[in-house]
Image (cartoon, rainbow, N blue to C red):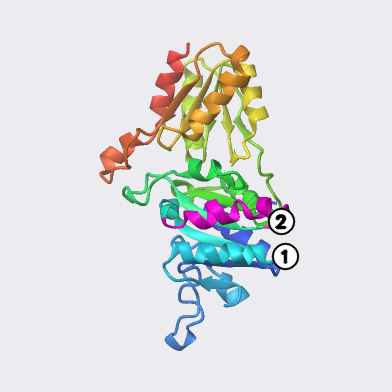
Amino acid sequence: MARELPMLFAINEALHIAMESDPDVIVMGEDVAGGGGRADQGIEEAWGGIMGATKGLYTKFGASRVRDTPISEMGFLGAAVGAAATGLRPVAELMFIDFLGVSFDPLLNQAAKLRYMFGGKVRVPLTVRTCTGAGTRSAAQHSQSLYAMTAAVPGLKTVIPSNPHDAKGLLLSAIRDDNPVVFCEAKSLLFGSGEVPEGDYEVPIGKAAIAREGSDVSLIGIGQTVTTALSAAQTLESEGISAEVLDLRSLYPMDEEAILTTLEKTGRLLIVDEATPVCGIASEVASLCVDKGFDFLNAPVKKVTAPHAPVPFSPVLEDAYMPSAARVVAVVKELF
């Protein structure tokens, strides 16, 4: 049975299910337990991390499985890699993907390579949950979309859900995967609600999903920009253009078959990506379409992305910085 839940609650539910079903799953990060356990100070319930996604885990599973860490991303991600390589399934919360810069070595040179370097004899079932994206007035150091950096590292998987249903199922798949997975959570979507089935289910990593059927042009969205693409598709429909929307969901492994299938169907394709335009996922999709789908193209592949600039703090500038449905509609009309 499905209920309406915010994405944040769906993530919390997935963590509860994963920890109930497997005693090797642990959660660690800055303030994930919060005040939990300090009964001598009258604090018995944790806030649950920066967004509250881990609320309730400490009181249910205890200090041995829900661990607050020092403010040292390099330190606790290194510890998480070690825990994964020696039998546990850690879920490490990296508050914002912007902090990747001070914690990249354990992911780049350890988590991503250990299984390969040991000939498959070592598993690294590590999940890194992290917030990404602009639109919440969090300024340049807490608003970036850096998922292309992790998707580019051989040995790392990177996923980003656009709705609560997929958030719960993808997180359960990530936690149960024997490889390191970076699980990106678009901050602007965390409090938006959608249908979420009760109980345990998984959404496969590496599979995109059709969010809307169409016949004239394909719009590919990533996380928050799936919502942007759907809004643009509705406007285009009123103007006589049928837009199909593909939710990429998995940035690596990427569902090349789904991308080429929708391109073959419509002959026109536009990628909407909140990240900056240079060396990004949008460029990767465009490259794939030209390389393997050239014969399907009736028009050039187009991209709508953020500009190649830091995220502004000014609300007016931040709104202009982010890809909008109006920009998508304008670029789609160029294709015709």
Which contiguous range is marked in magenta? Answer: 102-123
User: Mark 2 or mark 1, which is nearer the start of the sequence?
Assistant: 1
* CA distance separating discs 1 and 2: 9 Å
Residue 307's disc number: none
Assess whether residue 195 is covered by the magenta stretch.
no
Viewer-nearest residue: 147 or 50: 147
Judge left or right: residue 99 versus residue 44.
left
Three-letter code, disc 1: Ser
Residue receiving disc 1: 21
Judge left or right: residue 94 versus residue 124.
left
Quick check: marks 1 and 2 in contact, CB under 8 Å? yes
Assess whether residue 110 is covered by the magenta stretch.
yes
Residue at the spot 70% in from the left edge and 58% down from the top edge? 122
Residue at the spot 46% in from the left edge and 76% down from the top edge? 35
Q: Position of residue 210 (x, y in %)?
A: 63, 32
Residue receiving disc 2: 200
Q: Position of residue 228 (x, y in %)?
A: 46, 33
Which quarter of the figure has residue 297? top right
